[in-house]
Amino acid sequence: MRTRFTLLRDLTQRAWRHAGALFAVALMLASPLSIASAAEPPVAKLPAAGPLTEAERKEILAELQPLQDRLAALRNSPNVKPDRWADAQIFVKGVVWALDFGPVNDAKSRELVQKGIRRARERIDALAAGRQPWAERRGSSVRGFISAVDGSVQPYGLVVPAGYDPAKPMRLDVVLHGSTPATGIGELQFIHVADAGDDAAAATSTDNFIEVHPMGRLGENAYRFEGETDVDEAIEAVCRDYRIDRARIVLRGSSLGGVGTWQLGLKRPDRFVALGPAAGPVDTYVFANAPWKHFVRLDPLTSWQKTMLPMVDAIDYTANAGMVPVVAVMGDKDPYFESHLLIERAFAKEGIPFVGLVERGAGHGVTAKVMQEQLRLLGEHAAKGRDPFPKHVRFVTWTLKFSRCDWLEVLSLEAHYLRAEIEARIAADGSITVNEPRNINRFGIHPPALQAPGASVTVGGTKIDLPARPSEIARPVVIERHNGKWEYQGTLDALTLTGKRPGLQGPIDDAFARPFLCVRGTGQAWNPAIGAWADANLKRFANEWRRHYRGYLPIKDDTDVTEDDVRRANLILFGDPGSNRWISKVLPQLPIQWTRDTLELGKDRHPAADHGVQLICPNPLPGATGRYVVLNSGHTYHDSELRFSYMVFPRLGDWAIVKVGDNPRDVPVTTVMESVLNSGFFDESWATPSTR
């Protein structure tokens, strides 16, 4: 029998041709008077083949509008949970994206559109009647959640076994799908595979675990930044509805899902009980040079791009496999087999045994027998569960974006994108011995470590003086190096951390992994060319976000931004100090000088008439603690890079100086006329700019 995992894997390995033209759909949420369904027309039957005609599109839009109206009413109903509302909204959203970006040109795609409308109506009817049968059923279903990143609704697949007992915590397997082009119809395809209807039919799964299949924003984003957040949000959505044993969460996936498994699992090893990557590359260069005929080779990388590769490449975190067991699978005829050998050598270098199942003669995909053996081995680890309080922790990172493993947290680095390592052991009496940390200036020790009376901390052979009061030691303790000496600094909750720190370390692309708001300048730009360039950047970002990240870009005019926006979101400011009032507010506290005539960053000085700046910094405004401010940039990789997942890595660092070209206003934008003159990083204090 084909498992749901197999079906999802098969779906994500298909290629779909892009539509020749796009059709923009704007569904306005009216203020409905009723959520009844009596006046709604039945789902129209479309012809079996051929591209949709304009008349057919209008007919579908007419069917969608009342569904949107009813969903708007249900969104405000106290009897409908946000997750259940999202369970219905995913179908309407899927149809909208299919209409806007296609292709809807054959019997299969047309049926998917019809099914999307039908299933949306079924779930809306159920919610209006106070029912949610899909939430109680066993077997396969499709669900949704509202993303905190941009407020969009994102679907995920779910498989609940027949033996699930709400009274008992159950293992959860997070299954990442393979490569899928970001076509408009792709969301309906993903939904279709997971959707087995809402009737309480007999379960098809006899496994002893629940499966969640995150969509990961679909496309080729490689589970990075907002794609990584999507995985986290899908896990939390399942945990809201089911009793999950968090010590038994398995992460696995095939192809691009294997890439995601390697990188998410090794960078955050304390979140999973075991990792099961299949046919997944582990770095950028070997991945890009795999012998696929359709692959496009990487252009030569700049110095700053090379510097940042350890942020994305899983192989640089191999040492963390000592904290989470890995069972890898690969066919020896797979075009990515060199990646398998590469990670095997990396394990050996770190002194960690490598469990890699190699199927002789298999290409990019292995037999069910080998996959079952992988599942068996993963099941052995899951049955034991993850130790919630390991007495030995060894953790490697290259960035404070990935800063914690169990009770150890790295809080400050000497330099980003160089290997940082910390290793510590807890003795029988609760005392902690930390080897001399590498490339680390500050770290924290979290409970339940350091709870025993009289427990001490020794770092690099030096015993740390700790306060005598147990109440202070019961909270996270911060140890920092001053003048070459490690010292106790206090408890984490009582300190105000400065400089680059977890969650505020850059680069620019990191701003889009958490809630953000783009702010459009409405004033008069100091220099017309800069105003046009900023507008073009915002337009391109909105276009790419919708197509590649499956949501509407959050945008407000600068005159409409509230104090609550400043508190809750990273602010992405477009314009210059003349056109955008928020740029003018933050500018005095940013490490740049910007006037009508000149733009200065460090030692570089440029004419402001035709030079712009893109940068990321902590937001200095009152109430914006823990938030970024970004100037004039969305993601630093664009359409051409998003064709292949190995191209999805930061193209700019913390800052960039740009020579702007001619960017006409009031036209759709897919390309921005600009030339990056230089890019680099701020130092660990977010002050001095440099290039590496």
Image (cartoon, rainbow, N blue to C red):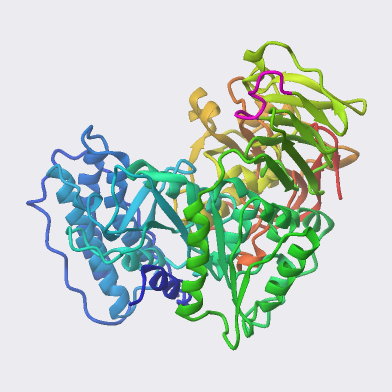
Residue located at (59% from left, 88% from top) = 361
Q: Quadrant of the N terminus?
A: bottom left
For residue 166, which quarter of the picture? Answer: top left
Left or right, residue 540 beside residue 89: right
Question: Residue 184, percent across and down?
Answer: 41, 65
Question: Residue 457, percent across and down?
Answer: 77, 26
Q: In the orientation shown, which residue stands out farthest toward the left? A: 38
Residue located at (73% from left, 47% from top) = 397
Label count reads 0
The question of residue 496 being in magenta is answered with: no
* Front position in the image: 25 or 341: 341
From where the camera sits, is residue 214 visible?
yes
Residue located at (17% from left, 59% from top) = 199
Q: Is residue 356 shown above or below 93? A: below
* Front position in the image: 506 or 588: 506
For residue 119, which quarter of the picture? Answer: bottom left
Magenta span: 446-455
Left or right, residue 639 beside residue 417: left
Question: Residue 89, percent across and down?
Answer: 30, 51
From where the camera sits, is residue 58 visible?
no
Q: In the orientation shown, which residue stands out farthest toward the bottom? A: 361
Question: Residue 52, percent across and down?
Answer: 30, 74
Dominant secondary-structure state across the stretch colored magenta: loop
Residue located at (73% from left, 38% from top) = 425
Q: In the orientation shown, which residue stands out farthest toward the front? A: 428
